[in-house]
């Protein structure tokens, strides 16, 4: 069941609506209580948490070899942290969690053609799971995005439509197209956050059925915040955890929409506080659709949103890849935020979510991390 956040109208799960007839944002009903007994232990990946997802029989769940992604100890900013390697999902980003569940639901509802707009990872995930579902898929993308991601999207068989201009121009083009085609929006569709919530359950299970003290995620629209908040609400209602983990939404200094609710963001010379350009293209979002819901979730968790500069993102990226973790620039944003958060070191496990693979942005990473070339003389 979904409910409109504007007019309160309810919609059943057999209706493939991506927004309310009044134009309002649809939200999934609150999650049912979740406990250890709810886990489907025979499932190897995020379908383990099917009890927290819209009803899908085992044969209705799309599978591309999802795994429980590794949680690996590492040192960052003098901190001992656990890196959650969510780039090790089938299309190489955490977006597979939302896309797998959304495409499974749409296939069940009889939807055969969809489109989405995406700055990259969401498009690749949608294209991958649409291919698995046999759903015809079109992805609108900003023309200037990473060639690696565009190649991946079209390789899955999706139709790629490049839109000139900003990310906002792409969103506008999507709204026009939504009049004539089904908009499987990773931002608007109410099912997507439920899929992303599997990340929260997975971390809890990997920590021996405990919540971490803090989780760092990159944030543009804030879908990871919504997903994690949903998971930990379900676990709290199920009596599994006493305290919610503090969620830290790390934003680019260039797009500080969420952080403005928590700190004064430094102004530019012209009085604006946005720069409109960042190395972290995956979180280049001016106006998050569910901004107030995301900010409320952060407050409830005792976390907050923080901004980091491109310099800090570049440093974090360099540290990660030099340690062997090959992430894309947006995937390094959460690690950059850890340096700003001034956490209490004795508080308990801290998880940093690495969201997307560096293999999608080889050239950009090479430019940002300036690898040392080997000179002929060193060979001899
Ligand atoms: Zn409505």
Image (cartoon, grey):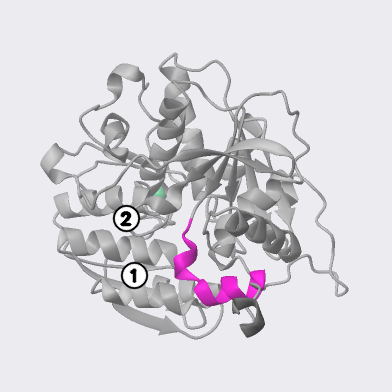
In the image, is residue 190 above or below residue 185?
A: above
Which residue appears at 63% of the width and 46% of the height?
249
Main secondary structure type of the part rendered in magenta: helix
How packed mark 1 is, by other alpha carbons closer than 10 Å (few <14, some 14-19, many 20 or more), is some
Residue 333 disc label: none
Q: Which residues are magenta?
A: 356-370
Which residue appears at 73% of the width and 56% of the height?
308
Residue 178 disc label: 1
Q: Is mark 2 within 8 Å of ligand 1?
A: no
**156 with respect to 363 (left or right):** left
In the image, is residue 234 above or below residue 286?
A: above
In the image, is residue 352 above or below residue 255?
A: above
**82 with respect to 95 (left or right):** right
Q: Pick the residue in front: 116 or 245.
A: 245
On whether residue 358 falls in the magenta region, the answer is yes
Q: Secondary structure at mark 2?
A: loop
Of labels 1 and 2, earlier in sequence is 2
The answer to which image quadrant residue 294 occupies is top right
Residue 90 disc label: 2
**270 with respect to 42 (left or right):** right
Residue 217 pos. (x, y %): 58, 46
Residue 163 pos. (x, y %): 45, 83
Which residue appears at 25% of the width and 27% of the height?
41
Which residue appears at 18% of the width and 64% of the height?
135
Q: Which quadrant is home to the N terminus?
A: top left
Residue 251 pos. (x, y %): 66, 55
């Amino acid at each position: 069941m979904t409910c409109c956040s504007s007019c309160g109208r309810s919609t059943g799960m057999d209706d493939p609506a991506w927004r309310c007839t009044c134009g309002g944002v649809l939200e999934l009903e609150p999650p049912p209580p979740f406990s250890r007994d709810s886990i489907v232990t025979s499932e190897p990946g995020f379908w383990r948490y099917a009890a927290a997802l819209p009803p899908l029989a085992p044969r209705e769940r799309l599978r591309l070899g999802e795994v429980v992604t590794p949680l690996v100890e590492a040192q960052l900013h003098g901190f001992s942290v656990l890196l959650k390697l969510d780039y090790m999902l089938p299309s190489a980003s955490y977006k597979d969690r939302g896309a797998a569940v959304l495409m499974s639901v749409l296939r069940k509802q009889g939807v055969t053609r969809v489109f989405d707009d995406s700055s990259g990872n969401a498009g690749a995930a949608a294209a991958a799971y649409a291919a698995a579902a046999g759903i015809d898929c079109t992805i609108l993308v900003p023309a200037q995005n990473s060639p690696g991601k565009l190649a991946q999207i079209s390789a899955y068989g999706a139709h790629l439509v490049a839109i000139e201009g900003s990310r906002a121009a792409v969103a506008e083009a999507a709204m026009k197209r939504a009049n004539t085609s089904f908009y499987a929006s990773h931002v608007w569709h109410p099912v997507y956050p439920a899929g992303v919530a599997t990340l929260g359950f997975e971390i809890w299970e990997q920590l021996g059925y405990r919540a971490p003290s803090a989780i760092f995620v990159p944030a543009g629209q804030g879908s990871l915040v919504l997903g994690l908040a949903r998971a930990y609400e379900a676990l709290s209602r199920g009596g599994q955890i006493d305290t919610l983990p503090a969620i830290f939404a790390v934003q680019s200094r260039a797009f500080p929409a969420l952080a403005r609710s928590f700190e004064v963001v430094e102004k530019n010379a012209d009085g604006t506080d946005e720069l409109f350009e960042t190395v972290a293209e995956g979180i280049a979002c001016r106006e998050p659709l569910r901004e107030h819901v995301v900010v409320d979730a952060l407050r409830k968790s005792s976390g907050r949103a923080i901004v980091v500069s491109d310099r800090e993102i570049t440093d974090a990226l360099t540290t990660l890849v030099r340690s062997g973790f090959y992430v894309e620039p947006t995937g390094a944003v959460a690690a950059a935020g850890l340096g700003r958060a001034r956490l209490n070191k004795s508080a308990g496990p801290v998880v940093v979510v690495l969201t997307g693979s560096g293999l999608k942005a080889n050239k950009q990473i090479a430019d940002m991390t300036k690898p040392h070339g080997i000179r002929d003389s060193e060979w001899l």
